[in-house]
């Protein structure tokens, strides 16, 4: 049986408009923008990128800072709409992109568990079922009634990771979030990602550590200045990449 394509990226380009002018005041900006006199520099963060991810693949995205990895992942997560081209996603996506972005810092950890569950589309009852697992995985049992504003960034990340990885999503996006917390916790997170891989979750993965990419991913998308430089098997591409940088 053929494996299904779960993510298809077809000729995707992404343009950001950067204002190239400085304004003396907000008023000047508003007046000029109403008169259509503000000029923008066009910046293409992605240019004509195409690739496909099959079910059960774990795809690593590599490339220097600013090469477009996060922008690519955000178009797949549906956070950004590409300026040109088409992204097709078959299945539900659990995005680990900016951990804690969905938190209300005035609420307690427990309240945030339910808030985030709702954001992910889970009912209160389902979250009741997942609650103990989230508390246990994040190792925050004594802190669940504390407002999250009193948490360290590591605690926030642990809680956010635990919430975002409940259940078995079809697609898990991991954008440089494994460098948070201590080494032991990182190992635990990696273990959970590997468990999902075994259960058939497709992984899209970005990490500072090329070793981590090599150990988790079977395919690689190599981006350079927003363009697809190489797409293929990890063994072939990582060797060449390591020679370049
Ligand atoms: N919202 C935005 N507005 C303007 N420029 C952006 C925005 N998001 C990203 N960029 C720019 O797009 C380029 C690619 O960024 P990014 O996708 O974050 O790269 P990477 O994750 O590979 O480091 C960078 O030059 C970055 O400054
Ligand atoms: Mg990035």
Image (cartoon, grey):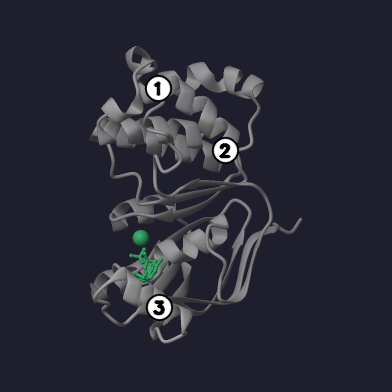
Circle nearer the viewer, 3 or 2:
3
Q: Quadrant of residue 152?
A: top left
Where residue 242 appears, as percent x and y from the top left, is 27, 69
Helix or strand or loop: what does disc 2 sit on? helix
The span from disc 1 to disc 2 (Cα, nearest Å) is 16 Å
Q: Which mark is residue 238?
A: none
For marks 1 and 2 on the same chain, the one whose residue lies earlier in the sequence: 1
Q: Work out whether residue 206 or residue 226 is closer to the camera in this orientation and state it.
A: 226
Residue 178 vs 118, above or below: the answer is: below
Where residue 197 appears, as percent x and y from the top left, is 53, 43
For marks 3 and 2 on the same chain, the one whose residue lies earlier in the sequence: 3
Residues under numbered marks 3 and 2 in contact, where contact means CB atoms less than 8 Å apart? no
Where residue 195 appears, as percent x and y from the top left, is 50, 35
Q: Work out whether residue 116 or residue 131 is closer to the camera in this orientation and state it.
A: 116
Q: Residues within 10 Å of mark 1 (few under 14, many from 20)?
A: some
Q: Quadrant of the N terminus?
A: bottom right
Residue 118 appears in view: yes
Name the residue tied to disc 2: 119
Q: Which mark is residue 108?
A: 1
Q: Residues within 10 Å of mark 3 (few under 14, many from 20)?
A: few
The span from disc 1 to disc 3 (Cα, nearest Å) is 43 Å
Q: Work out whether residue 239 or residue 17 is closer to the camera in this orientation and state it.
A: 17
Name the residue tied to disc 3: 31
Quarter holding ligand 2: bottom left
Q: Residue at x 24, y 35 (%)?
A: 183
Left or right: 227 in relation to 57? left
Helix or strand or loop: what does disc 1 sit on? loop
């Amino acid at each position: 049986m053929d494996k299904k394509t779960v993510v298809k990226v077809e000729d995707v380009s992404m343009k950001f408009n950067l204002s190239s002018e400085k304004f003396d005041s907000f008023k000047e900006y508003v007046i000029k923008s109403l008169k259509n006199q503000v000029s923008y520099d066009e910046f293409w963060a992605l240019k004509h990128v195409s690739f496909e991810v099959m079910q059960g693949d774990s795809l690593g995205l590599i490339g220097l800072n600013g090469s477009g990895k996060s922008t690519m992942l955000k178009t797949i997560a549906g956070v950004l709409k590409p300026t040109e081209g088409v992204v097709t996603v078959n299945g539900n996506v659990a995005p680990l992109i900016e951990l804690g972005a969905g938190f209300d810092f005035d609420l307690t950890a427990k309240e945030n568990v339910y808030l985030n569950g709702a954001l992910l589309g889970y009912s209160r009852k389902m979250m009741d079922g997942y609650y103990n697992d989230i508390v246990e995985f994040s190792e925050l049992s004594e802190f669940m009634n504390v407002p999250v504003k009193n948490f360290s960034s590591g605690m926030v990340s642990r809680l956010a990771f635990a919430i975002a990885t409940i259940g078995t999503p079809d697609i898990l996006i991991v954008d440089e979030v494994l460098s948070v917390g201590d080494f032991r916790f990182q190992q635990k997170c990696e273990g959970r990602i590997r468990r999902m891989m075994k259960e058939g979750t497709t992984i899209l993965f970005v990490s500072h550590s090329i070793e981590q990419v090599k150990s988790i991913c079977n395919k690689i998308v190599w981006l350079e200045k927003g363009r697809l430089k190489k797409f293929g098997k990890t063994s072939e591409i990582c060797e060449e990449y390591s020679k370049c940088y």
